[in-house]
Amino acid sequence: MKKDSIWFIFGFISGFILTLLGMIKKNKKLKKVEKKEDEYILKVEENLKKLEKILNQNLKGGNK
């Protein structure tokens, strides 16, 4: 009976540790994805600013 309870406790603790490790690994992957998304958003914003400048020049008649 004691061996069964020891194995149960060991299994429970090891399962808990593996779950925590999995959550940490998944969190790191999510941070990498968020970082890439932020970089992409910044690039899009820069391109929009460039397009806005070009459109403003065309509307003002800068490229006649």
Image (cartoon, rainbow, N blue to C red):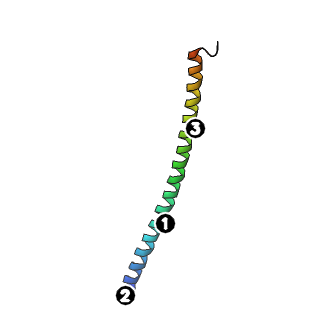
Q: Residue lying furthest bottom in this view?
A: 2
Q: Position of residue 16 (x, y in %)?
A: 42, 70
**Front in this rendered view, residue 38 or 60:** 60
Mark sitting on residue 4: none
Residue 43 circle label: 3
The one nearer the camera, 48 or 40, is 48
Circle 3 Cα neighbour tier, 10 Å, few/some/many (<14 / 14–19 / ≥20): few
- Using a 10 Å C-alpha cutoff, classify the residue at mark 1 as few (fewer than 14 neighbours), some (14 to 19) or many (20 or more): few
Residue at x-position 48% and y-position 57%:
27
Which residue in the structure is indicated by mark 1?
21
Label 2: state its secondary structure. helix
Q: Quadrant of the C terminus?
A: top right
Q: Nearer the viewer, mark 1 or mark 3?
A: 3
Give the residue pinned by disc 2: 2
Kind of residue at disc 2: Lys
Q: Position of residue 9 (x, y in %)?
A: 39, 79
Q: Nearer the viewer, mark 2 or mark 1?
A: 1
First of labels 2, 3 by sequence position: 2
The amino acid sitting under disc 3 is Lys
List x then y, in percent, for residue 49: 56, 30
Q: CA distance from mark 2 to mark 3?
A: 62 Å
**Residue 50 occupies quadrant:** top right
- Give the vertical position of 3 relative to 30 (above or below): below
Q: Nearer the viewer, residue 16 or 32?
A: 32
Which mark is in front, 2 or 3?
Answer: 3
Q: Earlier in the sequence, mark 2 or mark 1?
A: 2
